[in-house]
């Protein structure tokens, strides 16, 4: 017998170009060929629903030793089966994160290692960007020993952090990443150099996160058009991550960019306990809410799903394991509806835009197990 069958759902998988009504069979935690003569221990009737690969939130903070942390399993109701922690830990505390969160979590977790040894502990404590304090030997050791988990090096490249060091912390981070053959993930809010110069330092698979941030120099230049260096970076394979956050999305940047169809390659939340489903109008809430914003802005459905499945899975080196419904892949799935529902999407300056469609996850399957199912499925 199969462990689980999901039938009558509309499957959409950008990784395999599968789109249409399809039955998905699961056995021993993986997706297997479906044979209608074989029964299943459990069945889900997904009539009227989409069946997507499990969502991947590529920019989160889930290290429980930080005051920012969101417990990973709390993300299951939003269709999320894998996350990337974006530099919450540095070389001092990464191994604690690995032993006590990554290895124990039902959610698949990979991470960027902060260039600062302390990472982002929160509580009003911020990283030092003094290059003399970067422990390059320890960073190299951790990346060598945890290469299956550490994707690259994270730097928050903001004026208030780098102070008089200018571009040097960024230059040193990029040089170390190239030496260790990993990518760079850069926090771009209020950079100490022009954003055009910053993006010119990045190469294929490097992450320009908070792409629509609006403080200081941004991706928008004269006449409210995208600076040419950003189009050139996209051609090089630089990855642009929405990484919404509470403070990193500005309509004065996003709307001109989206008008030119400069869509995010990755849609992520930058989720912390300060932004996760906070009362009232929250700019973040959860990943499906952020996905809904781009749907209302006119981003193609397939492109949205690609930005939370195929692309992040590739960057995690897991493209044949997760982010897809292909046979042989791990059975990570999200059963979801797109409902007509009024919504308000707020930016970092308090400007509100109205929407009328929402992604509403109805069930989440992780490693072939039902880890969340709403009562009306």
Image (tube, helix red, strand yellow):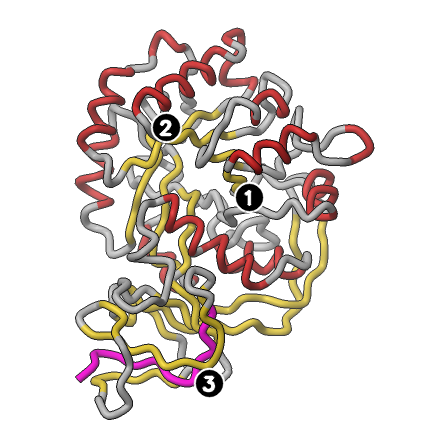
Q: Is residue 121 visible?
A: no
Q: Residue at (47%, 18%) from the top-left corner? A: 170
Q: Which residue in the structure is indicated by mark 2?
A: 153
In magenta stretch: residue 5: yes
In magenta stretch: residue 299: no
Q: Viewer-proximal residue, 35 or 184?
A: 35
First along the sequence among labels 3 and 1? 3
In the displayed structure image, the side of residue 166 where residue 68 appears, left or right: left
Residue at the right extreme, as displayed: 223
Q: Position of residue 166 (x, y in %)?
A: 54, 11
Q: Which residue in the structure is indicated by mark 1?
A: 242
Q: Which residue in the structure is indicated by mark 3?
A: 47
Q: Position of residue 78 (x, y in %)?
A: 43, 62
Q: Viewer-proximal residue, 314 or 375?
A: 314
- Count the labels in the image: 3
Q: Residue at (54%, 58%) from the top-left corner? A: 304
First along the sequence among labels 2 and 3? 3
First along the sequence among labels 1 and 2? 2
How would you classify the magenta stretch by its main secondary structure? strand
Magenta segment boundaries in residue numbering: 1-12
Quadrant of the image occupied by residue 121? top left
Q: CA distance from mark 1 to mark 2?
A: 18 Å
Q: Is residue 302 visible?
A: yes
In the displayed structure image, the side of residue 208 where residue 318 appears, left or right: left
Label 1 sits on a secondary structure element that is: loop
């Amino acid at each position: 017998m199969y462990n689980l069958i999901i039938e009558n759902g509309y499957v959409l998988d950008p990784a395999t170009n599968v789109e249409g009504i399809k039955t998905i069979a699961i056995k021993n935690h993986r997706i297997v060929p479906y044979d209608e003569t074989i029964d299943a221990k459990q069945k889900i009737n997904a009539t009227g629903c989409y069946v997507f690969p499990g969502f991947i939130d590529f920019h989160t903070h889930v290290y429980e030793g930080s005051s920012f942390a969101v417990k990973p399993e709390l993300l299951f109701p939003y269709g999320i089966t894998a996350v990337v922690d974006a530099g919450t830990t540095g070389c001092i505390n990464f191994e604690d994160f690995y032993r006590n969160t990554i290895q124990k979590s039902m959610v698949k977790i990979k991470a960027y290692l902060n260039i600062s040894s302390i990472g982002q502990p929160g509580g009003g404590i911020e990283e030092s960007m003094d290059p003399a304090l970067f422990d390059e030997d320890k960073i190299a050791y951790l990346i060598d020993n945890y290469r299956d988990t550490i994707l690259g090096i994270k730097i928050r490249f903001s004026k208030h952090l780098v102070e008089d060091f200018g571009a040097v912390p960024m230059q040193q981070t990029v040089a170390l990443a190239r030496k260790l053959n990993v990518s760079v993930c850069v926090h771009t809010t209020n950079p100490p150099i022009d954003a055009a110069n910053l993006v010119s330092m990045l190469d294929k698979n490097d992450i320009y996160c908070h792409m629509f941030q609006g403080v200081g120099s941004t991706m928008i230049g004269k006449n409210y058009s995208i600076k040419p260096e950003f189009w050139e970076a996209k051609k090089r394979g630089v990855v642009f991550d929405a990484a919404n956050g509470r403070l990193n999305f500005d309509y004065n940047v996003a709307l001109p960019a989206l008008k030119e169809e400069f869509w995010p390659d990755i849609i992520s939340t930058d989720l912390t306990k300060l932004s996760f489903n906070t009362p009232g109008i929250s700019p973040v809430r959860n990943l499906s809410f952020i996905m809904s914003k781009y749907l209302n802005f006119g981003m193609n459905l397939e492109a949205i799903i690609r930005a939370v499945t195929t692309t992040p899975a590739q960057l995690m080196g897991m493209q044949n394991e997760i982010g897809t419904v292909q046979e042989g892949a791990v059975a990570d799935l999200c059963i979801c509806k797109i409902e007509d529902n009024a919504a308000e999407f707020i930016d970092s300056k308090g400007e509100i835009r109205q929407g009328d469609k929402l992604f509403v996850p109805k069930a989440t399957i992780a490693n072939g197990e039902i880890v969340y199912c709403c009562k009306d499925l």
